[in-house]
Amino acid sequence: MNGPEEWEGYDYREPCPPHHDGPGEPPGAAPGPPTARPRIPSPRAAAEDRGPLPDAPENAAPDRGPAPADAAPPRTPAAPGDAARPGGGRPGDGRPELPHRVLTSLLGAWALAACSPEETAAVEAHLTDCAPCADEALRLRDAVGLLHPADSLDLDPLLRSRVLEGCLGRRPARIPVPEWAAPYDAETAKLDALLRDMGDAEWRAPVRLRWFDGEQPVHRETTAAGVLGHLLAVDGLVATALGLPDPLGDAAPTGRAGPGARTRALWRTVGEAPRTPALHRPWREQSHTLIRTAAFAGGGVGDLAVPYGPVQLPLRDAFLDRAFGCWLHAGDIADAVAYPHEGPAADHLHSLVDLAARLLPRALAHLRQSGLAAPPRQLVAAGAPGRTLHLEIEGDGGGHWYIALDSPAAVGSPEHTVAHLALDGEEFCQLAAGHIVPDEAAAGSDGEREAIRDVLYATASLSRL
Amino acid sequence: MQQRLARGEAAALGELYDRFASLVHSLAHRVLGDEDAADRVTREVFGYIWENPDAYDPKQGSLRSWVATLTQRQAVHRLRQTEAALAGDGGQEAAPAEVERKIRDASTAARADYIVTSMPAPLRDALELAYFQRRDYRQTAADLGVTADEARRRLRLGLQLLSTAHHQKPPSDGPGAGNGGPR
């Protein structure tokens, strides 16, 4: 391998010297003395900092500058000067060739088979000749073998609760997360995992937000990023009730702005169809802070009133409402980017259905005031049992609820049941989200048809922007 | 975070999980090659941290690298156990050298994963385009909006970082290793 015609094959116009077998040939076979090892930057110690990039060794090496055209090239690759200076170039020998500096810089691309054929040939010719480069080339090619597709394998969303339960079994928390905040904790964690998997383009995915205004389905177009903005703005109602900063800042509407007004205020500042992940971090920080604050405040804070526009909810219910919103809108985002998204755990789903069932008498009264539901059949004293609809929710997390039909102040009672309505838990939640029109809900029913119709419409009317 | 864990804040435990679960699970999965075993190591690692919040010494490096080290140690420990159990069951004694090679390869693969997830994003993005998307370095440069020189530099530097996964010793698994660690 010492004939001059072989190592003069540097000229990239003369690809592949005949003796060379391509990248499969161990570069260790290249001629040369024991090599000086190329300098390799050590791995970064701290993963979290994103400092300036470390410099490639080549950039740190002083440039030798162009060799004089008439300088005789070193005739053998064993020239000690070359081996000792991995950053050094091989002076031109009068033929057009890539300088050593460029060949070295190509090693990474070469190892990844990401060079042009001419460059590949030039690098490979060079490797037969330059031991330090050959040594590095071998290492880099081995490193390519360590590249692995990022685990597409999603973390099982149920693993989180199992791991946390296991931990808390080993050492109980001194400051636990209140039970009523657990669904919010779980649903925000699931949405966060989904958001982290999304590429930049997916944040622009169009989403149609749908709800039911009491009479008919309505919708509004936004993006995946816009949906997250909606969650951020509405979660902000809970944040401000707890004395935390309002995520809307100066853009917060004055007075008793509800979820819709707050969402529109946020969209006025970031646009109705934001296209970037910029809101991910503020949303996640706020959700973590909400959970933490609720945990510190302890159980007693569960009764704190959270204003939702004209109405208000106790904090414990507001957290359930936000868990419900988070789950449903995570579903909107997941659909838009064609990812799977699992529903809540059975006990959490039960709490969410329970909240909706408890809100139904008030929603019925509201429909009545708007003339959208039949007037009450009888007047019932507050706290007394009245005409009742038996709501049966099937599936995991389901159960039986008794909805007072005549007044929010009346008490539902099995003995006063006038109608029976049975729905699957998922179907009921989709109805409460306004994603299903009441007349099309797959429900089994029995008894007073008017009561059944009114409860289905009242359920759908729980939805809003 | 450490103080919050020490105080016994369940919310801090949740945040810890949200930050590191995918790292822990994927490293464990790389070593053990099994979903259930990776789940188990994930439970063990978080259980250990939650029970021993003071075991982390910020002077020794970032919380992330500590969590990765714990994970790798625990996953290798489980791999050894599995290998030993296999050898015990089958009666066919696996050659110790063979077991050691398997453990070394698994550790290298896990270290490589950690290096990839920890390297500066510009390097990782360049590798991603060139290797997984099969873009050549000029296309990679165009995709990233950088010069061809810079793309070559990032690819080379990224692989140089990655190649250090081969150099380090596999984590020791002796009884005295790093104050015990999860078991």
Image (cartoon, helix red, strand yellow):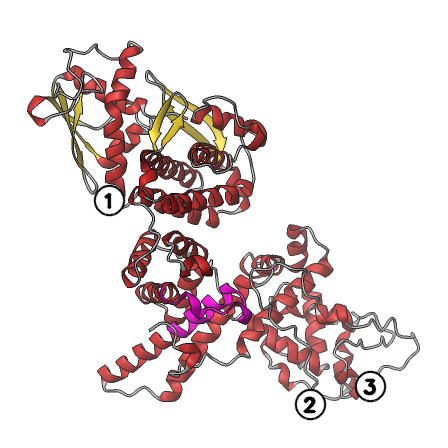
* Above or below, A237 relative to A99: above
- Which image quarter: residue B28? bottom left
Numbered circle sitting on residue A131: none
The residue depicted at 55 percent of the width and 45 percent of the height is: A200
The residue type indicated by label 1 comes to Ala
Numbered circle sitting on residue A75: 3
Q: Residues within 10 Å of mark 1 (few under 14, many from 20)?
A: some
Numbered disc 2: what chain?
A
Tell me whether the residue at label 1 lies in contact with that at label 2, contact meaning CB atoms closer than 8 angstroms: no
The residue type indicated by label 2 comes to Pro
Whether residue B13 is visible here, answered yes or no, is yes
Most common SS among magenta residues: helix
**Disc 3/disc 1 C-alpha distance (Å):** 77 Å
Q: Secondary structure at mark 2?
A: loop
Q: Earlier in the sequence, mark 3 or mark 1?
A: 3
**Disc 1/disc 2 C-alpha distance (Å):** 67 Å
Q: Position of residue A395 (x, y in %)?
A: 19, 40
Numbered disc 1: what chain?
A
Looking at the rendering, the stretch of residues picked out in magenta corresponds to B51-74
Q: Earlier in the sequence, mark 1 or mark 2?
A: 2
**Disc number lying in front (3 or 1):** 1
Q: Nearer the viewer, residue A356 or B77?
A: A356
